[in-house]
Amino acid sequence: MKTSTFESEDSPLPHVHSEHIRQQISDLIDHLKADIGRVPEPRFQALLATSAEVLRGLQQTFAHYEEHSEPAWQLPELPEIDADADADV
């Protein structure tokens, strides 16, 4: 389920924020990888490549949270958050 930036900023639902953050990380990874070909300095290229790898790990961590695929994310079920509850206030 894709949501707009406006919806994700106001949503109380963790998966909405997680999806948005993963997309932002993906955009940054793409930018870093593109810059590797633009910058001739080898040490800076290594910094860009390392940064992209670290961000891929962080992106995967958010995916694991969303999928509940790691033991840390398999805690007892948390209560459901009613996204419309704040609209009635």
Image: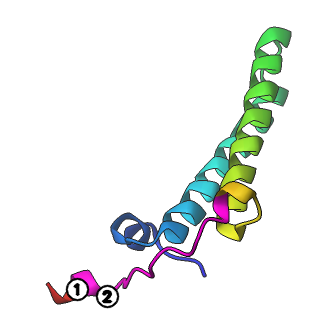
Q: Using the image, determine if residue 1 lies above or below residue 55.
A: below
Residue designated by label 1:
87
Q: Which residues are magenta?
A: 73-86
Q: Do callouts 2 and 1 mark residues in contact (Cβ within 8 Å)?
A: yes
Residue 84 is marked as 2
For badge 1, the amino acid type reads Ala
Identity of the residue drawn at 45% across and 72% down: 13
Regarding mark 2 in the picture, which secondary structure is present there? loop
Name the side, left or right, on which 45 lies relative to 31. right
Query: Where residue 51 appears, x then y in whole percent?
Result: 73, 29
In the displayed image of the protein, which residue is found farthest to the left? 89
Q: Residue at x 83, y 15 (%)?
A: 40
Q: Quadrant of the N terminus?
A: bottom right
Is 22 located above or below residue 67 in the figure? above
Q: Determine the residue located farthest toward the front in the rendered image.
A: 76
Q: Position of residue 41 (x, y in %)?
A: 81, 10
Decide: few, some or many residues near mark 1? Use Cα within 10 Å; few <14, some 14-19, many ≥20. Answer: few
Q: What crowding class fits label 2: few (fewer than 14 Cα within 10 Å), some (14-19), or many (20 or more)? A: few
Verify whether residue 27 appears in magenta. Answer: no
Q: Quadrant of residue 18?
A: bottom right
Residue 71 in picture, x, y percent from top left: 73, 58
